[in-house]
Image: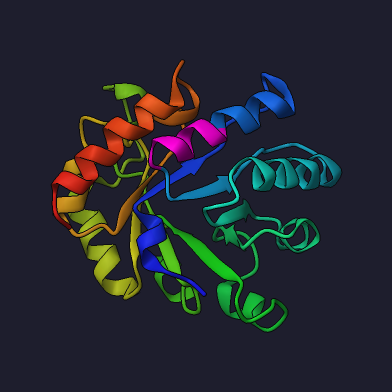
Amino acid sequence: MFDARSLRLVAITDSLRDGMDGLSDRASAAVRGGATMLQLRLPGESARTLVLATRALRAAAPGVPLLVNDRADVALAAGADGVHVGSDGLSPMALRRILPAPFIIGFSVGEQADVVRSAGADYVAIGPVFTSGGGTGPSDAIGMARFVELAAECGVPALAIGGIALTNARDVMAAGAYGVAVISALFGVRDPMLAARAIRSALDATGS
């Protein structure tokens, strides 16, 4: 059963640059540091690789929900807890008709048109809120004010995603986010456990 408290700190994988064992170690470290959900996202990898990676993450961090990005078939085959889909895939309502009742379904929202399609999702991930990498050039970042507007319209727990780091995590929680979804600030650092611990501490300090 979906518990919105699992959205506090969602760790999203980046790549298999250090192999399956390396990815599992980084995921496990992030969870030990305070990550409350894992999402497997490995663009371009085969279904077989995704199944193996899902099972590896499940074994490495059995205590938190594990979702697979875009691939409901992989999530089912590998025993994940749910799937996270974008606006170019099946809608949450369509997935509800074919997935088991306890399955968690997340949906990505980046613009107004996505709000209607989010119906049936347990939660939404809204963004990108900030520019990734701290760049100052043209960006598709929606900003904090738009995040708040879209979250209110979706009417389900909302995650902030895109450019989330220790420096801005408190801000999105203060704006009403249930939590944050983080990729590079957890999986792209030398010590994911310490990074997760710092971000989780900042989130918990808001009292939200």
Q: In this orientation, does residue 101 appear?
A: yes
Q: In this orientation, does residue 111 appear?
A: no
In x, y percent, where is residue 78? 77, 55
Residue located at (62% from left, 51% from top): 69
170 is higher (above) or lower (below) than 15: below
Q: In terms of depth relative to the viewer, which is nearer, 197 or 17?
A: 197
Left/right placement of residue 19 relative to residue 62 reads right
Point out the stretch of residues depicted in magenta.
Answer: 27-34
In x, y percent, where is residue 161? 37, 46
Residue 32 in which image quadrant: top left
User: In which quadrant will I find the C terminus?
Assistant: bottom left
Residue located at (26% from left, 22% from top): 136
75 is higher (above) or lower (below) than 191: below
Q: In terms of depth relative to the viewer, which is nearer, 202 or 115?
A: 202
208 is higher (above) or lower (below) than 183: below
In x, y percent, where is residue 147? 26, 55
Residue 162 in which image quadrant: top left
Residue 183 colored magenta? no
Prevailing secondary structure of the magenta residues = helix
Give the residue at the far top of this rendering: 190
Residue located at (67% from left, 38% from top): 43
Tell how many labels.
0
Residue 30 colored magenta? yes
